[in-house]
Image (cartoon, rainbow, N blue to C red):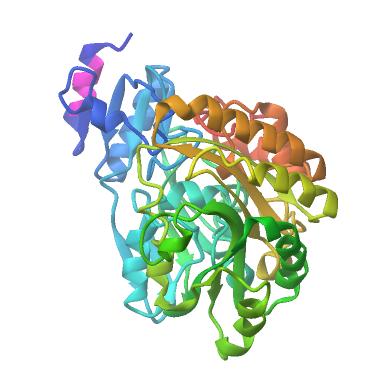
Amino acid sequence: MLNPNRVTELSAVLRGRIVQPDDTDYDTTRRVYNAMIDRYPGLIVQCRDVADVMHCVNFAREQTLLLAVRGGGHNGGGLGTCDQGLVIDLCGLKGIRVDAQARTVRVEGGCTWAEVDHATHAFGLAVPCGIISSTGVGGLTLGGGLGHLTRKYGLTVDNLLEADVVLADGSLVTTNAQQHPELYWALRGGGGNFGVVTSFLFRTHPVKMVMAGPTFWPLEKAGEVMRWYRDFIVSAPEDLNGFFAFLTVPPVAPFPEALHGKKVCGVVWCYTGDDADAVFKPIAEFGPPLMHGVQPMPFPMLQGAFDGLYPKGDQWYWRADFVNELSDAAIAEHLKFAAQLPTPQSTMHLYPIDGAAHRVKSSDTAFSYREANWGAVFAGVSSDPAEVPAITAWTKNYWDALHPYSAGGAYVNMMMDDEGDDRVRASYRDNYPRLAAAKKRYDPGNLFRVNQNIKPH
C-alpha cells in the first residue's frame, strides 16, 4: 500500500507530474502500445529531467515498489508497465542534438525513432534502428536493434557510443568504452536490466534517400520465393537489406486495388547504394511478382511506412527465434502457417542479421547471436479483443513448429513476458554469466526486473 505522505514528498521534489488511479487521465496514461497488456500501476511519473528519474528510482527502492521504465511504451510484452508499482515514464526527456561534423546524435530516453529520424535526416544522416518509427529509442536499442540498415551498418547497439544511466542506487553514471566498460558491454543487448538510460550517444551514417519498398509474390509461390530469398540475400551487396514477410495486402493506397485483402509473401527492401537498376533487375523479374513497389524515398518515409498499419491500441501476441539456416523442411512448416494467417494484420518476418552485424564477435556485446542469418518474429495482431485466442494460438503453434529449426535463442525485444528464465538464458548463451555478474555489480537487489530479467549472481 502506497503511503500518501511519501507520495506527497516525492511530488514536491519533481518537475514532472505524478498520475495516480484517481486522476481523470489515469486510464489513458497507463495504456501502452499492446492493448493486450492491461496493467494498473500505483503511480506513473511523467519525468521531465534526469533529476526526476533519480528521485523516482530512490523512491521505488526505498518503498520496495515494483519498478517499470517506459520509453516509447512500444514493447510487445508490456515491459514498460506493471501492476501496483511505479512506472517511470520518460515522456518528458525529448532532447535530440545532432553533431553533423562528428556524425553523432545525442538522444534522450523518451524519444521515438520518428523523432530521431526527423532530426538526423536534415543532415543527411541516420542511425540504424528498427522498421516502425513509433518505436521507442530506449527499448529497441537496449535489446539489440534489428532494422533496415543492419546489413550495411550493423545493429543499433553496434552504433551506441555512450549512455547516461541512472543506477539502482540513484546515482547517474556515463558509460562508454573507457568509463564503466562492463556496463557499456551489458547495455548493448542486455535490455533494461541495469538502470534507466536517460540519454544515448549514437554514431550516424550518411543515409538520406533510399531505394525502397515491397515486392509481393502469390502465396502459392512462397516456397519457391523463400528458397530463392535464402540464397539471394546472404550474397547480395551489403547496401541491400530486405526482410521477408507473409502478410495480407492492406486495402489502402499505394497497393493496387486488385491485391487488397490478398494473402501474399513479400520482401521489403532498402537499398543505400548506387546503380539501383542493376541490383533490382533480377528481383523485379523473379517470379514474376504481383507487385514490385520499389522507388526512391527519404529514409524516414520508409521508417514510418508501417506506422499506420500498426497503431497503438491493437492486440499483439508474438514469439521470436534466431535462424541460422532456412531449410526446405522449415520452409514447408512456414507454408502451413502462412496459409492460416488469422487476421489481416498478423504476419511473420525474417530480418537479416548478416553483413556488418556478422563482423562483430558474439562476446563483444551482450547481443550474442552474431552468426545467425535472420531474426524471425511470429506476430498475431488484431484490433479486436475477441480475436486474442485465435492470434495467440496461431503464434504459439507457429513458433512451436519452427523452433526445432532455429538457433535456440530469441531476440529479447520480440519476446513476451511469459516465456521464462530458460528462454532468457538461451537468448544470451555464453554471455549470460558475464551479464549476471554485471547485474550483481550494478543492480544487486534486482530493482530493475520488469524486463527479460537477468538474475544477479
Q: Is residue 8 magenta?
A: yes
Q: Farthest residue toward the front?
A: 258
Q: Main secondary structure of the magenta part?
A: helix
Q: Quadrant of the C terminus?
A: top right
Residue beneath the point at 77% across and 58% down: 371
Residue beneath the point at 60% across and 71% down: 289
Q: Quadrant of the N terminus?
A: top left
Q: Is residue 211 magenta?
A: no
Q: Quadrant of residue 224?
A: bottom right
The answer to whether residue 178 is seen in the rendering is no
Q: Residue 154: horizontal and vertical position, in percent?
A: 61, 66
Q: Identify which residue, 127 or 162, lies in the foreground.
A: 127
The answer to whether residue 356 is seen in the rendering is yes
Q: Residue 227: horizontal and vertical position, in percent?
A: 77, 63
Magenta region: 6-11
Residue beneath the point at 81% across and 39% down: 404
The answer to whether residue 228 is above or below residue 200 is: below
Q: Quadrant of residue 421?
A: top right
The answer to whether residue 404 is above or below residue 175 is: above
Q: Residue 69: horizontal and vertical position, in percent?
A: 41, 36
Q: Identify which residue, 155 or 339, lies in the foreground.
A: 339
The answer to whether residue 209 is above or below residue 56 is: below
Q: Quadrant of residue 65?
A: top left
